[in-house]
Image (cartoon, rainbow, N blue to C red):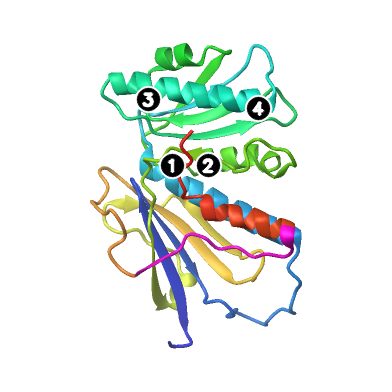
Amino acid sequence: MKSAVAIRERWVAGKVIGTTVKLPAGNHTGKRAKRRNITSDMVRKNNDRLAERNLTMLIDANFGEGDGHYTLTYAIAPTQKQAAKDRDNFLRRLRYAMQKQGKELKYIAVTEYENKRPHHHIIINSNDMELIREKWGKGHVYCSMLDETGDYQELAEYLIKETRKTFRAPGAVHKKRYSPSANLVKPVIKRQYVDVAELFETPKPISGYYIPEDRITRYKHPITEVEHLEYTMIAKKEPRKYKTWPKGEVVSSIEYYKVNYEEEQEALMLDDIWAALDC
């Protein structure tokens, strides 16, 4: 491998092609910083960053215009265990109802408990508000329809923020940040080695795509301090018919650092990000 190289990782998720360009581990630009101890806070920040990226990929690959982000609330506050049962029962009833319509339910579910009455955020491949209200029946249902862009990073960031503290709490019913249905497409990350200049240049989209300025991010890894460039290309009309990016080798979407037993357990939760938890 030549010294002046960077790593480019790409994945295809619906109308979105995501890209990360970074230096190989152990390489830095400028003066090398002093060796640092990895702290629990660094691990949490890194895990939050990865969770946001992976959830964004999952939403982009499986949902789009005409699907909804539903918030299910309660008229009477339940216990955490009862809220978990209510969510399971709702999804079971909804799945059966959609099957009768000839449709297959897809969802990503998040439940939040902290500082407010328990409520559920669920992304569902349906715009049938009447059906969802009927199958919930515990309180109000609010809905935000997904837009036509196919880029749902802000929604993913919001959902991760909702559970940032509660999924770690002792005695939490839901030990994971979110629960996806078993039938979701899981994007594949492909890795290539590229000229290091690509890390510092302004990214250019491929034909038929555009790159929003607010989706170009430069940062240093919270643990390694390696330089990163991330950007998103969005299809102007119909996306290219890629199931995966055609070049490069497949790599894992999991990256974590462990400090002690507690942080190791938290990091290991990322191993289940793509595991289907069928409620």
Q: Are marks 4 and 2 in contact (CB under 8 Å)?
A: no
Mark 4 surroundings within 10 Å by alpha-carbon count, few (fewer than 14), some (14 through 19), many (20 or more): few
| Mark 2 residue type | Ala
Where in the figure is residue 249, as x and y percent of width and height? 35, 70
Mark 2 surroundings within 10 Å by alpha-carbon count, few (fewer than 14), some (14 through 19), many (20 or more): many
Residue occupying the point 27% across, 63% down: 246
Q: Are marks 1 and 2 in contact (CB under 8 Å)?
A: yes
* Disc number placed over residue 156 in the picture, else none: 2
Residue 125 sits above or below residue 100 on the image: below
Sooner in the amino-acid sequence: mark 4 or mark 3: 4
Asked if residue 261 lies left or right of residue 194, the reply is right
Q: Nearer the viewer, residue 47 or 214?
A: 47
Mark 3 surroundings within 10 Å by alpha-carbon count, few (fewer than 14), some (14 through 19), many (20 or more): many
Q: Which residue is mark 1?
A: 59
Q: Judging from the image, what secondary structure is the residue with disc 1 in?
A: helix
Sooner in the amino-acid sequence: mark 1 or mark 2: 1
Q: Nearer the viewer, residue 168 or 146?
A: 168
Where in the figure is residue 114, as x and y percent of width and height? 72, 32
Q: Which residue is mark 4?
A: 81
Asked if residue 161 lies left or right of residue 243, the reply is right
Q: CA distance from mark 4 to mark 2?
A: 25 Å
Residue occupying the point 38% across, 18% down: 128
Mark 1 surroundings within 10 Å by alpha-carbon count, few (fewer than 14), some (14 through 19), many (20 or more): many
